[in-house]
Image (cartoon, helix red, strand yellow):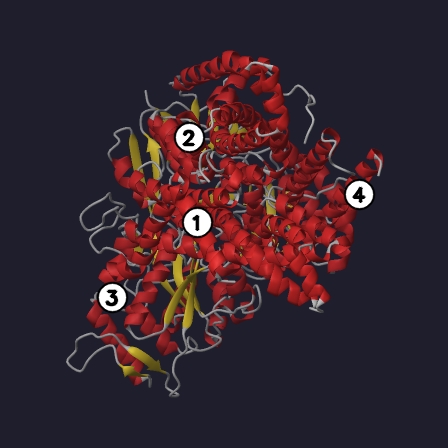
């Protein structure tokens, strides 16, 4: 029996009174005021409001490798050369003009523009030298591997630099010269301090950037973690008032406000409400109908430099057999994927290099199952397999030509084909890939192949496919392939076939390796193009990867306040748009 | 055992448990497949670059060496640098902690208050239709699926009726326009409403039911009969005698239900993109950001252990039946 | 075990149980869901279009509302929502019941051993139980799920069971404690029965009913945790569960546009867990006479 004793006066009548008479009305007041505040829609056009799907990882350029960080940082740090938005050629940016290439001496002489950093100091060859030294001293990921072909870098005067290369390089202009230039003033002391520590790269990457010095159109004004980033116009932007690549550059907005949203849903709602002018992310086709009906919103469709593909493991059966891979390629209904999964917002992909990359894309590679209907595809695949020695207990096509449910396919050796697994990312990560996997499973089963599509968490998937090579097939993609085709070598050269190497399929072809190595050294673009064409031919003949689709990038903007978005490969979110977008009068 | 030695024993126990959790966590993280580098799907990152990054992050040292460094760091308050953000983990956590504390304490306190108040009434009017309505509603609240309920509230109150913002903690255009402190506070409170409402309703159910059953068992006790015999008014009996005693187990159960509240809190933060520890944990965990995920988890574990310790001690102090 | 006396007790208990409104409602709801789960085996047989995971309607390409061919509508790739809902019922039962069952097995074993042996071992076991009980299961599952990659549904079930046995063990332990000193146990000991034999032949049959009572509460926890896990994207992606459905509606951006997709899974999760909980509460009242309404025996 317990005694009646007093406990601390936590629960007494008074508190209840307070609750009901004070708190509740206060809540009510807050709600009303809040609504009132949020209803104020400003027509202020000095702010261009952009929605981001996720918080940028870091505003430290050496750490911020995710797409949101890069989007922000690319407004600040500028390279010597970049790509023309329409022709995709490399044009001078921080450089004044095309470089002077001395073939015999293997040097590139580059004259720099008279540009200034955002604090008013001059951009000089010292900064270029410093950036190069930074790449070398810290072996900065992504940049060092390209820059190490530079033997020597000289700066004869404040606005000239001379690069001496070790050997001719096809990618000098497209990969080396497109690296961002950083200011010696800003990064000098940081680098010096980092080099004295045990883990210099980490120190460099962990440096908290407060006021980055840039040569670009905008500078960082305020960063409220988790909520927004406020950028203002850089008064010293070298491009202001100039006509570059056919555009009269501004920027014509004084402020950029990046709102960070948690989900696309909420961001689209914000777009519809007019809280933002542009959502800087790809929109799923499911939203299109709803947005199309909205007169205030414009939809933008552009091609992507992307590759979504079915990859095979050539190191073990069953996909060590080329004919089987080709048969699989034949039954995959790419039209279906385009209509259904992409809802027609995309282009079928025939080569490893997307068609949007028009200079390097080879349109004449071997195509599988093109123009065939289901029956024709299965019959053609059946023929290929039959002539290679495969047989079935019950073949997929009857003697009279009609399709039937097949069973028990046997390898040429006579053994039964064991079941194999097609790994895909989970549906929440990428519904398109997950669903493609499911459909491919169904198509292969119609051919009698014991296929099983299995979604797997993305990290595990990468570990399995790239790390320990323990897989049969997978559906993966690269959302933003560089426009320079050098990556063909990365994906398919045999020396990259190792744990964590980029050759995930295990493709080994000596002829291909030779070409891949050679094309790197060829400066003549036409000659190189022929080699790249040949490489694509080989790839589509041997099919270590079968390209599936290339989705369009779908984006939405509000058309009431700003206009002038620049459409280019990979979308309207680019530096040209931001420099050219104007308030609507 | 004296009171002071009881407290000491309890403290040592908590410390030991925490240390065990620390160690288990370390080994789990280190022995699992996948690592942050593999998430960088950039064809231009050569295996050399990757090896270099791994070395810089210290992931190439032998396991036991990493462990020693790990423990040492923990006790000096160094939680390392987040792989993803590059910032000191302690800074990130401190940044997010305030939001979680705001949401969590307000919702728990409100739910406890109202739950106890309503539970008291429900028990007093046991069997009546009021009691039935309250009990069933509480039951429903308790078993609601949090993400779904949160999404529903978001949809109805946020989207359809437009009463509340759809997430986040503030309105950027307001803050950039140099709004006054008062407006800023109101803005944050406005954003707080929906997550608060969600957590409040979920937790309300459990507090109400707890108070109700606790009150019911108290009401059967002899001293209540005595009080009635003494001629005290019903109201006084209810509020002064019964409720105060019945509330005790409810308070102590806050510790036990903490696990439930934390689960709910993490889910709520995720849906409303409320930048708290829960959401950060989920995010760090999906990115294999070891230091950050570890620290978030340890923080949560510490809070749970300490809260339960306090509750244990409180209960022991208040209830003379407990022998040390 | 199954003598006339226990049958009588069971029958009496059932009468009380069924009179209880909570019990009644709980049972009705459960029966409805059981039909749903059973139906999920038959629905895909109607046509390939109705397979919850791969069944797409060739004519439908976007998420559509309820119609004659799709009673609840379709998701954004054209799959039938009702088929998914039924499949989810099946998964919920499997997960809930298995996880509960395993946690009962572990909890009963631990509870019995702890109560019977007493002393330091008992204290150790109970302290462990206490610690596990206060840890937030979802948070732990998240960490484990992300570390060890894909979890298949049985591993999730197993981990939930491991997190949830402590509550059972406490109850079993106190029951064991009170049984320990009963005459018939003493008699067996004097007769030379080994400890194991006493535990399994004599104590276990008497604590089992209590264990099964507590199973209902474990079921609710298991279903809710699995749903939360799937919702966050860490569930088994080859299973269509209600939590998975909610994740799809959220991630595919149809949260605000498709109430026919958003509402049913959530309602089902809540109703099913509510039903089990009601069941548990009603059984509680059967076993604990003090909780019954006044006027009943």
- Do callouts 1 and 2 point to residues on the same chain? no
Q: Chain of mark 2?
A: B
Closer mark to the observer between disc 1 and disc 3: 1
Q: Hey, which quadrant is residue C179 in on the image?
A: bottom right
- Mark nearest the camera among 3 and 2 is 2
Label 1 is found on which chain of the structure?
C
Residue underneath mark 3? A370
As helix, strand or loop, the secondary structure at mark 1 comes to helix
Secondary element at image label 3:
loop
**Image depth: mark 1 or mark 2 in front:** 1
Kindly identify which residue carries mark 2. B132
Q: Nearer the viewer, residue B125 or C45?
A: B125
Q: Nearer the viewer, mark 4 or mark 1?
A: 1
Q: Position of residue A159 (x, y in %)?
A: 59, 39
* Residue A348, visible in the rendered structure: yes
Measured in 3D between alpha carbons, the distance from the residue under mark 3 to the one under mark 2, in whole angstroms, is 68 Å
The residue lying toward the viewer, choosing from B245 and A233, is: B245
Q: Is residue B84 above or below residue B118?
A: below
Q: CA distance from mark 4 to mark 1?
A: 50 Å
Relative to the observer, which residue lies in front, A492 or A520? Answer: A492
Chain containing mark 4: B
């Amino acid at each position: 029996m317990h005694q009646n004793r007093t406990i601390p006066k936590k629960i007494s009548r008074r508190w209840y009174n307070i609750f009901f008479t004070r708190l509740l009305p206060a809540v009510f007041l807050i709600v009303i005021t809040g609504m009132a505040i949020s209803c104020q829609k400003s027509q202020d056009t000095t702010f261009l409001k952009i929605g981001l799907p996720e918080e940028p990882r870091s505003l430290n350029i050496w750490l911020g490798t995710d797409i949101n960080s890069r989007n922000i940082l690319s407004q600040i740090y500028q390279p010597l050369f970049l790509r023309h938005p329409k022709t995709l050629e490399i044009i001078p940016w921080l450089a004044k003009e095309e470089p002077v290439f001395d073939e015999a001496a293997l040097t590139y002489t580059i004259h720099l523009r008279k540009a200034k950093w955002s604090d008013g100091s001059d951009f000089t060859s010292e900064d270029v030298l410093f950036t190069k030294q930074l790449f070398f001293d810290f072996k900065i990921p992504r940049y060092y591997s390209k820059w190490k072909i530079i033997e020597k870098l000289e700066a004869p005067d404040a606005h000239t630099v001379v690069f001496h290369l070790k050997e001719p390089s096809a990618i000098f202009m497209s990969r080396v010269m497109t690296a961002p230039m950083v200011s010696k003033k800003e990064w000098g002391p940081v680098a010096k301090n980092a080099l004295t520590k045990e883990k210099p790269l980490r120190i460099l990457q962990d440096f908290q950037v407060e006021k980055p010095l840039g040569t670009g159109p905008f500078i960082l004004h305020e960063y409220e973690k988790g909520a927004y980033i406020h950028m203002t116009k850089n008064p010293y932007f070298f491009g202001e008032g100039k006509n570059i690549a056919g555009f009269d550059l501004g920027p014509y907005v004084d402020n950029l406000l990046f709102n960070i949203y948690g989900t696309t849903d909420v961001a689209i709602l914000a777009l519809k409400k007019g809280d933002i002018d542009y959502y800087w992310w790809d929109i799923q086709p499911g939203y299109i109908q709803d947005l199309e009906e909205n007169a205030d919103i414009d939809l933008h469709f552009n091609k992507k430099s992307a590759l979504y593909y079915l990859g095979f493991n050539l190191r073990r059966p069953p996909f060590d057999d080329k004919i089987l891979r080709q048969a699989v390629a034949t039954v995959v209904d790419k039209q279906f994927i385009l209509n259904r999964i992409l809802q027609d917002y995309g282009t079928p992909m025939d080569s490893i290099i997307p068609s949007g990359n028009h200079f390097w894309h080879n349109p004449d590679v071997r195509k599988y199952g093109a123009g065939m209907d289901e029956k024709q595809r299965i019959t053609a695949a059946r023929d290929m397999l039959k002539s290679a020695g495969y047989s079935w207990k019950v073949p997929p096509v009857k003697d009279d030509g009609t399709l039937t449910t097949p069973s028990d396919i046997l390898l040429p050796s006579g053994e039964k084909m064991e079941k194999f697994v097609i790994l895909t990312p989970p549906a929440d990560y990428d519904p398109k890939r997950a669903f493609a996997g499911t459909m491919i499973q169904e198509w292969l089963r119609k051919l009698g192949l014991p296929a099983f599509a299995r979604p797997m968490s993305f990290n595990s998937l990468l570990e399995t496919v790239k790390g320990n090579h323990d897989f049969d097939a997978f559906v993966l993609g690269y959302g933003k392939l560089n426009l320079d085709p050098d990556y063909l070598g990365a994906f398919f050269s045999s020396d990259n076939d190792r744990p964590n190497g980029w050759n995930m399929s295990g493709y080994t072809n000596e002829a291909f390796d030779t070409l891949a190595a050679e094309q790197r050294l060829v400066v003549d673009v036409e000659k190189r193009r022929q080699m790249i064409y040949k490489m694509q031919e080989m790839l589509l003949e041997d099919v270590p990867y079968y390209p599936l689709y290339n989705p369009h990038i779908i984006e939405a903007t509000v058309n009431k306040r700003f206009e002038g978005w620049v459409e280019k490969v990979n979308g309207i979110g680019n530096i040209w748009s931001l420099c050219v977008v104007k308030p609507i009068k | 055992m004296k009171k002071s030695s009881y407290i000491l024993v309890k403290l040592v126990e908590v410390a030991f448990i925490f240390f065990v959790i620390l160690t288990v966590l370390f080994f789990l993280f280190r022995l699992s497949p996948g690592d942050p580098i593999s998430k960088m799907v950039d064809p231009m990152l050569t295996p050399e670059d990757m090896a270099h990054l791994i070395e810089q992050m210290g992931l190439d040292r032998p396991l036991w060496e990493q462990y020693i460094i790990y423990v040492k760091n923990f006790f000096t308050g160094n939680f390392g640098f987040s792989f993803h953000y590059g910032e000191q983990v302690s800074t990130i956590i401190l940044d997010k902690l305030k939001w979680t504390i705001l949401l969590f304490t307000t919702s728990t306190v409100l739910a406890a208050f109202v739950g106890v108040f309503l539970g008291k009434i429900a028990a007093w009017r046991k069997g009546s239709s009021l009691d039935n309505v309250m009990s069933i509603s509480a039951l429903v609240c308790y078993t609601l699926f949090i993400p779904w309920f949160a999404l529903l509230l978001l949809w109805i109150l946020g989207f359809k009726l437009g009463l509340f913002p759809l997430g986040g903690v503030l309105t950027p255009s307001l803050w950039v326009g140099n709004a006054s402190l008062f407006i800023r506070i109101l803005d944050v409170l406005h954003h707080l409403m929906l997550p608060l409402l969600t957590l409040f309703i979920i937790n309300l159910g459990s507090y109400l039911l707890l108070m109700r059953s606790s009150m019911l068992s108290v009401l059967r006790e002899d001293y209540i009969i005595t009080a009635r015999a003494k001629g005290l008014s019903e109201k006084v009996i209810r509020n002064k005698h019964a409720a105060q005693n019945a509330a005790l187990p409810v308070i102590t159960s806050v510790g036990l239900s903490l696990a439930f509240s934390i689960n709910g809190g993490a889910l709520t933060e995720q849906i409303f993109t409320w930048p708290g520890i829960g959401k950060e944990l989920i995010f760090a965990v999906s990115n294999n950001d070891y230091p950050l995920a570890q620290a978030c988890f340890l923080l949560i574990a510490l809070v749970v252990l300490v809260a339960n310790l306090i509750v244990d001690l409180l209960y022991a102090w208040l209830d003379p039946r407990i022998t040390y | 075990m199954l003598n006339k006396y226990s049958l009588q007790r069971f029958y009496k208990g059932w009468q009380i149980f069924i009179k209880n409104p909570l019990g009644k409602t709980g049972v009705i709801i459960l029966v409805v869901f059981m039909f749903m789960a059973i139906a999920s085996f038959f629905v895909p047989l109607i046509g390939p279009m109705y397979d919850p995971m791969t069944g797409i309607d060739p004519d439908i390409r976007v998420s559509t509302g309820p119609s004659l061919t799709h009673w609840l509508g379709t998701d954004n790739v054209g799959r039938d929502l009702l088929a998914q809902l039924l499949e989810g019922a099946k998964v919920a039962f499997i997960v809930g019941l298995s996880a509960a069952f395993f946690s009962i097995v572990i909890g009963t074993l631990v509870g019995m051993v702890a109560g019977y042996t007493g002393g330091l071992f008992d204290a150790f076991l109970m302290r462990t139980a206490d610690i596990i009980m206060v840890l937030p299961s979802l948070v732990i599952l998240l960490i484990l799920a992300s570390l060890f990659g894909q979890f298949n549904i049985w591993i999730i079930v197993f981990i939930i069971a491991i997190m949830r046995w402590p509550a059972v063990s406490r109850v079993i332990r106190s029951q064991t404690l009170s049984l320990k000193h009963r005459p018939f146990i003493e008699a067996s000991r004097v007769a030379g029965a080994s400890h194991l034999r006493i535990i399994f032949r004599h104590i276990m049959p008497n604590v089992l009913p209590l264990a099964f009572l507590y199973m209902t509460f474990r079921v609710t926890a298991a279903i809710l945790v699995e749903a939360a896990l799937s919702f966050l994207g860490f569930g088994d992606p080859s299973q269509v569960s209600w939590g998975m459905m909610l994740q799809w509606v959220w991630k595919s951006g149809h949260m605000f546009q498709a109430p026919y997709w958003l509402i049913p899974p959530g309602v089902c999760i809540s109703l099913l867990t509510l039903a089990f909980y009601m069941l548990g509460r009603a059984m509680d009242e059967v076993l604990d006479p003090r909780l019954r309404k006044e006027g009943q025996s």
